């Protein structure tokens, strides 16, 4: 993730205070599979018109569909099945959609018709630990980078699924109220902070700091 020094991650804002450091450092992390939340995917990759079902009957059970076999995937987290896609790939990488079991059956039918893989797991919301297990067992994913936004980062944090944090701290301040933070959306006000261990700090680009942490209890390779 790239953020201003006050921890804000609005895309249009960070574009003004950072350069190509994001993609250069992401490549160094050696994560063949990447994951983004609905808002980020909607901003950069999905069609502008949302999916609207004519029949809202929910799937109601766990299911997995693998359209293609690959050694890398682009994963979209879309709890309610709102996103529509211009293609089954993003930048040449096969797409995998993770949705909840509350999505309409029509949505999964659309994905299959368009050759898009999916994981459907979790009754009301997505069961992230189960989804990650299925990514590994059904798609062979061993290492993955979570690219935000703040609420999907917060969801992974709350589920105990963050092994490492790779942060680009860009030289700029946002300061606007209501802007999403690097990790956001956790409702439990009594939740204790997650402790991190500093692994490295490096200056990259025009004054950006690349800071890497591992979660306490993990080694440098993310193993607990």
Image (spheres, helix red, strand yellow):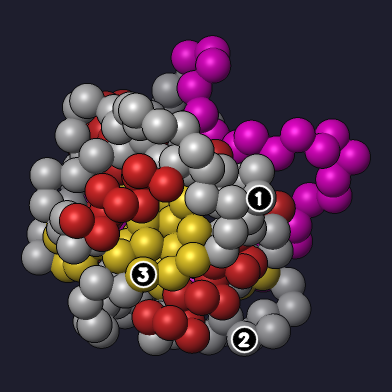
Q: Residues within 10 Å of mark 1 (few under 14, many from 20)?
A: some
Residue bearing mark 2: 223
Q: Which label is found at residue 123?
A: 1
Magenta region includes residue 186 = yes
Give the side of residue 167 with respect to residue 75, left or right. Answer: right
From mark 1 to mark 2, how far is it between C-alphas?
29 Å
Q: Position of residue 173 (x, y in %)?
A: 43, 26
Secondary structure that dominates the magenta span:
loop
Q: Residue at x 43, y 82 (%)?
A: 138
Q: Which label is found at residue 65?
A: 3
Picture quarter containing residue 89?
bottom left
Question: Vertically, is 192 above or below 15?
Answer: below
From mark 1 to mark 3, how far is it between C-alphas?
18 Å
Q: Position of residue 101 (x, y in %)?
A: 56, 51
Question: Vertically, is 170 above or below 216?
Answer: above
Q: Which residues are magenta?
A: 176-205
């Amino acid at each position: 993730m790239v953020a201003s020094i006050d921890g804000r991650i609005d895309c249009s804002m960070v574009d003004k205070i950072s350069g190509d450091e994001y993609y250069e450092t992401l490549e160094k992390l050696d994560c063949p599979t990447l994951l983004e939340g609905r808002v980020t995917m909607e901003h950069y990759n999905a069609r502008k018109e949302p999916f609207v079902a004519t029949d809202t009957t929910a799937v109601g059970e766990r299911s997995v569909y693998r359209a293609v076999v690959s050694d890398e995937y682009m994963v979209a987290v879309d709890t309610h099945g709102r996103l529509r896609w211009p293609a089954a790939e993003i930048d040449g990488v096969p797409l995998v959609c993770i949705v909840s079991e509350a999505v309409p059956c029509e949505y999964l039918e659309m994905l299959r018709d368009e050759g898009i893989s999916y994981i459907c797991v979790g009754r009301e919301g997505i069961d992230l630990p189960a989804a990650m297990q299925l990514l590994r067992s059904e798609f062979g994913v061993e290492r993955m980078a979570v690219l935000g936004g703040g609420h999907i980062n917060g969801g992974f944090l709350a589920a105990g699924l963050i092994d490492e944090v790779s942060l680009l701290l860009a030289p700029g301040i946002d300061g606007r109220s209501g802007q999403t933070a690097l990790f956001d959306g956790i409702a439990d006000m009594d939740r204790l902070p997650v402790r991190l261990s500093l692994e490295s700090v490096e200056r990259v680009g025009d004054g950006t700091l690349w800071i890497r942490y591992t979660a306490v209890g993990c080694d440098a390779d993310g193993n607990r």
